[in-house]
Image (cartoon, helix red, strand yellow):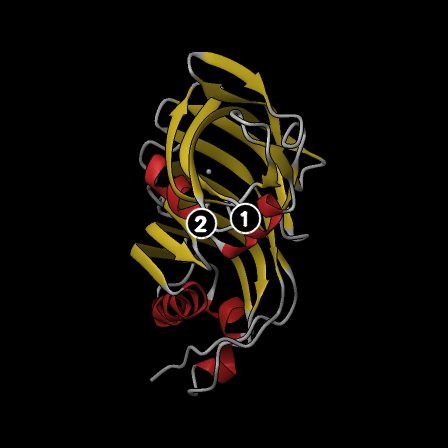
Amino acid sequence: MALLLSIPAIVVPSLPAASQVASTLLNPLVAAWIKSEIGEVENLKVQIAGSDQQILQGLIPEAQVSGDNLSYQGFQVSRIALDGQNIQLNVGQALQGQALRLIAPVPVAVRMLLSQADLNQTLQADLVREQLAQAQVSLPIGGTEVPFLISDPNVTLEPGQLRIQANLTTPEGATVPVTLTTGLTVQNQNQLLLVNPTWISEGQALPIPGLNNLAIQLDPDVNVQKLELQQGQILYEGSLTIQPEELAATAG
């Protein structure tokens, strides 16, 4: 889920390839495999390196993938680049028209760029909303304690923090407009932690104890190494272990 990316523009460099035949056959298969898994992605580029013998035996020494505007299970990413090594696939079967499958888990280095629009979309993903709603917060006016269930978020990314304007839904179904700021950091390489969340109300900054140090749990196969909040964007670097799973990509 996470996920994951020197990124103002991601370009897949050419790799030293001992073979043009097998990699040329396999590139579109891998592209179809990726699209079937994530649903939506633009400008998808796949670069495979390896000899004919290695690739036809199902071993890809190195593969690089990049794409723009990726959408996966409600999460949105403006740019993503992946770099995997020693990938084992059922290449022989796939070239005969069977589903392309990963045979063994593979760790993949990930770099991502997320824009403000990406984050607005991601805040409404079911996984994120469910975890945020587990926190109980006191409203800045009236002090009523409610689950932190927000809708229509408008996020502004600033250096070191993000500012969120949203509607918070009360248990009675009423919506309350709120504004808050918070930092965001990484904990245990597998959690995102809210840091010093604060209501902004009538010109005052009020701490939100119910959100302070709230940990958002990521997929266990995700490892976050760097998360940097910049003006208008978030830069992310980490790794992802992709588990074997049959994917609906075929040669035809």
Q: Check disc 1 and report its element: helix, strand or loop.
A: helix
x and y, in percent, of residue 237 in the image: 53, 36
Q: Quadrant of residue 184?
A: top right
- Residue drawn at the location 67% of the way across and 42% of the way down: 190
Residue at the outermost top position? 203
- Residue drawn at the location 51% of the way across and 56% of the way down: 126
Q: Check disc 2 and report its element: helix, strand or loop.
A: loop
Mark yes or no: residue 241 visible: yes
Query: Which residue in the structure is indicated by mark 2?
Result: 124
- Amino acid type, label 2: Gln
**Could you say which disc has been placed on residue 128 in the image?**
1
Quadrant occupied by the C terminus? bottom left
Q: In this rendered view, identify the residue nearer to me: 215 or 219.
A: 215
x and y, in percent, of residue 217 in the image: 65, 46
- Residue drawn at the location 43% of the way across and 87% of the way down: 96
Query: Are the residues tagged 1 and 2 within 8 Å (C-beta)?
Result: yes
Q: Quadrant of residue 46?
A: bottom left
Q: How many residues crowd around disc 1 within 10 Å: few (fewer than 14), some, or many (20 or more)?
A: some
Q: In this rendered view, identify the residue nearer to me: 31 or 51.
A: 31
Q: In this rendered view, identify the residue nearer to me: 32 or 71.
A: 71
Q: Is 185 situated left or right of 8 in this image? A: right
Q: Is residue 173 above or below residue 196?
A: below
- Amino acid type, label 1: Val
What is the number of callouts on the image? Answer: 2
x and y, in percent, of residue 187 in the image: 69, 33
Residue at the outermost right position? 188
